[in-house]
Amino acid sequence: MDQIQSPAVRVRGLRKAYGQVTAVDGIDLDIARGETLALLGPNGAGKSTTIEILEGYRRRSSGEVSVLGTDPATGGRAWRAELGIVLQSAAETGLYTVREQLRQFAGYYPDPRDVDEVIAAVGLEQKAGTRISKLSGGQRRRVDVALGIIGRPQLLFLDEPTTGFDPEARREFWGLIERLKAEGTTILLTTHYLDEAARLGDRAAVILGGRIVAEGAIDALGGAAARVPIVRWRDAAGARREQRTERPAELVAALAAEAADHGGEPAELEVIRPSLEDVYLGLVREASGAEASASLGASAPTPATTPEEARA
């Protein structure tokens, strides 16, 4: 397949084990060129291990991985120059000013962005001549992002990029990422802010226990059943009620008519359309319940199970 038409990231059967512990357990994943994928999951789910394998920093136990047409395990300097990486924490020295640090990093790439343009893009114009050690935590995070995009990457890894940002800074950052998307940059985003994933992601994949348990467009993740609206109200007796329905307007109209018959209106009536956060939390609860049930079942074999079957 032609590299231009092939996915920016292609993963098949990815597995990573540390002794008896399996951190990544058979992941299949594609990221199209120019697409932003939000990889979601709680701490310890396998996100960081997966990303480190894609970045070429960690060896996989088995499976096939292609990133920009190259196996990360063998990617060289030219391949790495096509990647931008914003880690959860960075190790840039505090001895340099913001501009000095960016100029140094720009020299590592064949076609870097203009340093002052990047400084402006991350909102650090007033701090360009300030030593990084003198910056606040949020400002240092902006430096991390600036270093990640200075090389004009084809593929940008963003690992919890807005940690430490205030609400205004987060929205400015979202605007920057949307501009990078418009330029055709492929982005793999991990974040605990579900509104951020919904705003920036084209698709999302949820990883739990080292496996992808759901994947799809942001507005379709979890399937149609997870998106059914919920109508909540308090009935005439004061009891809290709720009902899932694909026709919330009809239910609301019926409740309003019933209340009108008694000379009032429905109390505390609201219609809730599940957000990405609602769907995500539902998937996490469902997976956690299934894991607990499987664990309970494994620890208590039925009497009909023979010793040989138990060992198998």
Image (cartoon, helix red, strand yellow):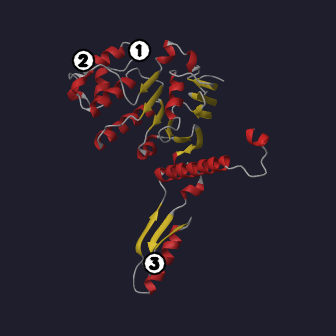
Residue type, mark 3 in image? Asp
Label 1: which residue?
109
Residue 214's quadrant in the figure? top right
* Nearest to N terminus: mark 2 or mark 1: 2
Q: Residues within 10 Å of mark 2 (few under 14, many from 20)?
A: few
Amino acid type, mark 2: Leu
* Residue at 77% across, 42% down: 307
Q: Earlier in the sequence, mark 3 or mark 1?
A: 1
Query: Looking at the image, can residue 157 be seen?
Result: yes
Residue 131 as seen in the image, left or right of residue 210: left
Image x and y of residue 304, in percent: 79, 51
Name the residue rendered at 46%, 36% in the picture: 190
Measure how far apart labels 3 and 1 are at the Cα level: 65 Å
127 and 175: which one is in front?
A: 127
Q: In the visual, does 202 lie left or right of 3?
A: left
Task: Give neighbour class at mark 1: few <14, some 14-19, many 20+ (Cα, 10 Å).
Answer: some
Of tags 3 and 1, the one toward the viewer is: 3
Q: Looking at the picture, tell me which residue is in the foreground, 117 or 142.
A: 142
The quarter holding residue 27 reads: top right
Which secondary structure, mark 2? loop
**Residue 71: percent from the left, percent from the top?**
59, 20
Residue on which the image places disc 2: 95
Instruction: Tell me if 97 is positioned left or right of 208 in this view.
Output: left
Q: CA distance from mark 3 to mark 2?
A: 65 Å
Going from N to C along the chain, the mark reached first, 3 or 2, is: 2
Q: Give residue 254's position: percent from left, percent from top.
A: 51, 77
**Residue 230, horizontal then vertical, whole percent:** 50, 64
Q: Look at label 1 and name its amino acid.
A: Tyr
Quadrant position of the C terminus in the picture: top right
Residue 235, numbered circle: 3
